[in-house]
């Protein structure tokens, strides 16, 4: 239809890829145009042609060029699968058919790194053993600070790794993106500080404890935002795949900063 002849295999594949990408994006101008034309009872070729025509306008709503960039990053499905395996902390060569020993060996290295970082976090907690013994509420509330920081860091890290993969993040805009993520982390820190502060006050009847965990929450969510963006950038700078190593280091930062901030502030303000 477009070239006056039967399309080749490559053209068919390109059209199928394009349609599968844009079909997921409900009411962009191109999708809306195709639906309107189809609803008039027109033929499918006209609907597709109308959708393609809508994409030529500068205000079509933001076609997902990023999706094509991600597709172009991988030469084969196996490369994409390798990144998924690395993100999960398992070896690229691992398969469901591997023996028990092969699977154990491929996973051991990253589990060992994770153990080392967990020991580091536990070591920080040990500095405040006396503080925890004097106030059991601290032990009860500690996981909240660490968990919120870990989740916030993972959110930022996921966005950063994806942006690095599609070349939307680099030295030219690193400062701007870092400041943006810090602003997001600080705002979320304030919001959740208020929530968890009032909750702790209600639960344990201590306004000072609520203030401590609120301050620790703000500090840790800000640290999570910084770690989530700076760790992938640093790994990429040193030619280390951020997909593989970012998660472990970001979690370590949020655990260490969260425990240190919460227990450190508690030892100063509460005891």
Image: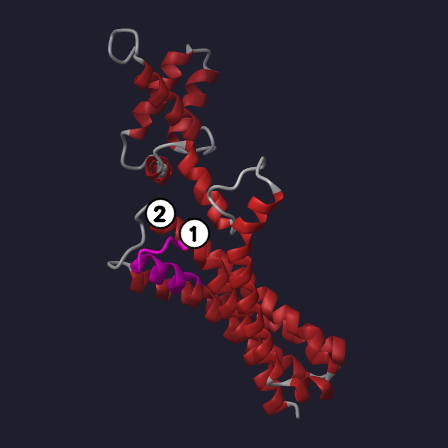
Which residue has dot 1 on it?
A: 243
**Disc 2 and disc 1: Cα gap in Å?**
9 Å
Residue 4 vertical placement versus 53 (above, below): above
Q: Main secondary structure of the magenta part?
A: helix
Which quadrant would residue 44 be assigned to in this image? top left
Which residue has dot 2 on it?
A: 165
Q: Horizontally, is 186 left or right of 121 in the view? A: left
Which quadrant would residue 211 be assigned to in this image? bottom right
Q: Residues within 10 Å of mark 2 (few under 14, many from 20)?
A: some
199 falls in the magenta region: no
Give me the residue at 59% from left, 85% from top.
127
**How many numbered discs, if any?**
2
Give me the residue at 65% from left, 74% from top.
142
Residue 1 vertical placement versus 269 (above, below): above
Residue 217 shows in the view = no
Q: Which residues are magenta?
A: 228-242
Of the numbered discs 2 and 1, the one sitting upstream in the chain is 2
Q: Quadrant of the C terminus?
A: bottom right
Q: Quadrant of the N terminus?
A: top left
Residue 180, x across and y down, in percent: 38, 63
Residue 27 vertical placement versus 207 (above, below): above
Q: Which marked residue is nearer to the observer: mark 2 or mark 1?
A: 1
Residue 82, x across and y down, in percent: 44, 41
Disc 1 on helix, strand or loop?
helix
Residue 60, x across and y down, in percent: 33, 34
Q: Nearer the viewer, residue 89 or 260?
A: 89
Which quadrant would residue 156 be assigned to in this image? bottom left
- Tags 2 and 1 in contact by the CB under 8 Å rule? yes
Residue 253 shows in the view = yes
Residue 98, x across and y down, in percent: 57, 38
Disc 2 on helix, strand or loop?
helix
Residue 118 vertical placement versus 49 (above, below): below
């Amino acid at each position: 239809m477009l070239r006056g002849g039967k399309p080749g295999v490559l053209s068919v594949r390109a059209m199928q890829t394009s349609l599968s990408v844009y079909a997921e994006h409900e009411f962009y101008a191109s999708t809306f145009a195709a639906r309107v034309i189809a609803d008039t009872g027109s033929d499918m070729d006209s609907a597709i042609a109308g959708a393609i025509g809508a994409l030529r306008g500068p205000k079509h709503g933001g076609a997902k060029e990023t999706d094509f960039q991600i597709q172009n990053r991988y030469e084969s499905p196996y490369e994409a699968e390798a990144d998924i395996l690395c993100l999960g902390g398992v070896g690229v060569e691992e398969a469901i058919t591997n023996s028990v020993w092969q699977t154990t060996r491929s996973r051991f290295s990253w589990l060992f790194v994770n153990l080392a970082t967990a020991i580091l976090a536990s070591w920080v907690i040990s500095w405040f053993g006396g503080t925890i013994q004097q106030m059991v509420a601290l032990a009860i509330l500690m996981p909240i600070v660490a968990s919120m920081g870990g989740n916030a860091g993972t959110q930022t890290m996921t966005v950063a790794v994806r942006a690095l993969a599609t070349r939307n993040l680099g030295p030219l805009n690193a400062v701007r993106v870092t400041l943006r993520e810090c602003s997001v982390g600080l705002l979320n820190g304030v919001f959740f500080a208020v929530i968890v502060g009032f909750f702790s006050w209600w639960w344990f009847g201590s306004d000072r404890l609520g203030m401590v965990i609120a301050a620790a929450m703000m500090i840790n969510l800000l640290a999570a935002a910084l770690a989530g963006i700076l760790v992938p950038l640093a790994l990429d700078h040193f030619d280390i795949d951020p997909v593989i190593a970012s998660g472990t280091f970001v979690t370590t930062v949020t655990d260490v900063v969260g425990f240190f901030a919460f227990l450190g502030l508690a030892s100063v303000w509460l005891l």
